């Protein structure tokens, strides 16, 4: 009798595990297992969507788990939390709707202390007197890559609702907003902009993630904002290969960055390029097509990569050369 019970229990466990491992979809063409760049370096991840991925993603509620932290020149190193729905907290904060608001959205496995934030928060505050809001969706971005990808979409929808609340309660205007995201966050800023009606004047996508996004209808799109700019620094490996925005920059050919020894370094180098674009000029030349951008055979009109303000009216692919060390921009310009 005891043996029968053990057999039944064993069968039940095996059935449950099989159900969790059931493959539901292949999100992208290509191999099932791929290396993905995260906070802890390069990790091998299963990119076939399974039941357990959906179950893991289900534990994350962006309306409850997401955090929003304000940094200004009055509090450059210690944030002021600005939770949605707390009008008094917003009113007592340093948030000033008359100033431009920068919204930062991190990538897979990132936290509030990740490089993305450490580099860009002080860079924006040094360059201009702005509000910087750090979006902390680290609960949804933790764990395996595919649940984080699913959570990225849901987080983007939630962040859009938060920004609508922020604008309505502060008396501000979306016309003074700039969204900046890296990797998974590079797609999430597009989702945010899309859910805000495409009226945000400036959206910057930094090496938006490639795995799981090749055929994903939720990926970054040019019309997610009034002016959208994409920076490709590990194109076709960790980052998206083809053009996604109004303007797409391919520094040094867009794949391997000078001074980097691995793909993770190249994938994150765009954060430093954007930060330094507030100080100097990354002058790029327009290219006829993607192949020209990748090899640097470009001699069209010039345009600065990055910067504090949008460049509406410009479109196309651009190639720009950088140094292997800081200053990253070419000082001759």
Image: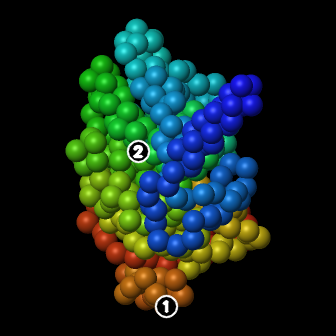
Q: Residue at x 46, y 66 (%)?
A: 28
Above or below: residue 158 compared with residue 153: above
Q: Quadrant of residue 248?
A: bottom left
Q: Residue at x 33, y 58 (%)?
A: 217
Name the outermost residue toward the front. Answer: 1
Residue 235 placement, left or right of 217: right
Observer-nearest of 42 and 306:
42
Image x and y of residue 306, in percent: 47, 60
In this figure, which residue is indicated by the disc labeled 2? 153
Residue 232 is labelled as: none
Image x and y of residue 167, in percent: 30, 28
Q: Quadrant of residue 173?
A: top left
Q: Residue at x 45, y 12 (%)?
A: 89
Above or below: residue 304 compared with residue 20: below
| Quadrant of image for the C terminus | bottom right
In this figure, which residue is indicated by the disc labeled 1? 297
Q: Residue at x 52, y 83 (%)?
A: 294
The residues tagged by marks 2 and 1 sit, at their Cα atoms, a distance apart of 36 Å
Above or below: residue 230 compared with residue 144: below
Looking at the picture, the colour scheme in use is: rainbow
Observer-nearest of 211 and 192:
211
Image x and y of residue 45, in percent: 63, 57
- CB within 8 Å, label 2 to label 1: no
Is residue 47 at all visible to an observer of this figure? Answer: yes
Name the outermost residue toward the top. Answer: 88
Tag 2, which secondary structure?
helix
Foreground mark, 2 or 1, reads 2
Sequence-wise first label, 2 or 1: 2
Is residue 278 at all visible to an observer of this figure? Answer: no
Label 2: how many residues lie within 10 Å, few (<14), some (14-19) or many (20+)?
many
Residue 204 placement, left or right of 114: left
Residue 176 placement, left or right of 331: left
């Amino acid at each position: 009798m005891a043996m029968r019970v053990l057999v039944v229990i064993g069968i039940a466990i095996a059935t449950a595990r099989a159900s969790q491992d059931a493959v539901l979809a292949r999100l992208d063409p290509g191999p099932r297992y791929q290396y993905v760049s995260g906070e802890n370096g390069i990790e091998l991840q299963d990119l076939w969507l399974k039941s357990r991925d959906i179950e893991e993603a289900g534990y994350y509620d962006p309306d409850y788990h997401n955090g929003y932290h304000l940094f200004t020149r009055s509090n450059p190193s210690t944030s002021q939390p600005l939770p949605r729905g707390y009008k008094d907290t917003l009113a007592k904060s340093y948030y000033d709707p008359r100033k431009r608001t920068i919204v930062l959205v991190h990538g897979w496995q990132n936290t509030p202390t990740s490089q993305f934030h450490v580099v860009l928060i002080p860079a924006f505050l040094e360059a201009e007197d702005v509000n910087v809001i750090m979006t902390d969706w680290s609960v949804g971005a933790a764990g395996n890559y595919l649940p984080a990808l699913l959570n990225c979409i849901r987080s983007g929808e939630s962040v859009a609702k938060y920004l609508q609340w922020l604008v309505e309660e502060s008396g501000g205007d979306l016309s003074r907003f700039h969204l900046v995201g890296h990797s998974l966050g590079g797609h999430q800023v597009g989702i945010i902009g899309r859910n805000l009606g495409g009226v945000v004047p400036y959206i910057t996508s930094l090496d938006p993630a490639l795995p799981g996004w090749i055929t994903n209808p939720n990926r970054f799109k040019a019309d997610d904002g009034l002016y959208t700019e994409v920076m490709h620094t590990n194109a076709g490996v960790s980052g998206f290969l083809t053009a996604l925005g109004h303007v797409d920059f391919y520094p040094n050919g867009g794949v391997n960055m000078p001074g980097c020894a691995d793909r993770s370094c190249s994938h994150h180098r765009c954060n430093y390029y954007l930060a330094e674009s507030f100080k100097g000029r990354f002058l790029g030349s327009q290219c006829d097509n993607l192949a020209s951008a990748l090899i640097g055979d470009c001699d069209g009109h010039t345009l600065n990569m990055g910067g504090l303000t949008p460049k509406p009216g410009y479109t196309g692919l651009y190639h720009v050369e950088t140094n292997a060390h800081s200053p990253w921009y070419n000082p001759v310009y």
